[in-house]
Amino acid sequence: MNVYLMHREIVCKGLGISMILIATLGWGLVYRRRLQLRIRQLQELIQVFALLKGELEYQCQILPDAFIACGTQVGGTCGQWMEATGQRLNQMQGEDFQSIWAEELAILEKQTALSPADIEEVRRLGNQLSYPDIHTQLGVLERYRKGLEEKERILVGELPGKMRTGTMLGVLGGVFLAILLV
């Protein structure tokens, strides 16, 4: 009878350790996926704002229509956000540009893998886009797009190392917890 209980205890500990290792490895993989998603969404933002600059400069569209056109062309989470912002701006039911931008940005923040710093930069961009001067808007968009491209370049360079680190931290954390519990 004692052999049966010992065997059962070993099996339960083995299953528990396996579950911990699988869970922490899963955490590492989720971290990797989030990094890749952030880069993809930064690329969407770059594309959206490059198209927006073109719409304003060459098509001479007003901001709401330009937002809708760019969002439709890009798609993805950031494109949908831009399109929704454009539609809200077209309706503009007694709200100003800043409040609509902030509300739609709060929705975007919940749906994306963008960092709080990325969202804050987009918030500042919205404050500067509300200027009525087209030259100011174009300059702001160009500076912001270049900043995004630089950030994307840095993140893509760091991606392999961060992905390895995230996966290894997940595995090592699982091993540490397994040792701690045994």
Image (spheres, rainbow, N blue to C red):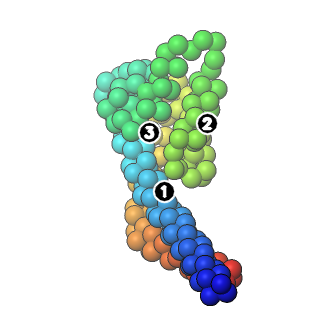
Q: Nearer the viewer, residue 84 or 64?
A: 84
Q: Is residue 98 visible?
A: no
Residue drawn at point x = 61 percent, y = 78 percent: 8
* 31 w.r.t. 62: above or below: below
Of the residues under marks 2 and 1, which one precedes in the sequence?
1
Instruction: Give the vertical position of 1 relative to 161 (above or below).
Output: below
Does residue 116 show up? yes
| Quadrant occupied by the C terminus | bottom right
Q: CA distance from mark 3 to mark 2?
A: 13 Å
Name the amino acid, label 1. Arg
In the rendered image, the residue lying farthest to the bottom is 3
Label ID, residue 77: 3
Disc assigned to residue 34: 1
* Helix, strand or loop status at disc 3: helix
Q: Quadrant of residue 179?
A: bottom right
| Mark 1 residue element | helix
166 or 71, which lies in front?
166
Instruction: Locate the N terminus and report the quarter of the image it occupies.
Output: bottom right
Q: Label 2, on which residue?
A: 106
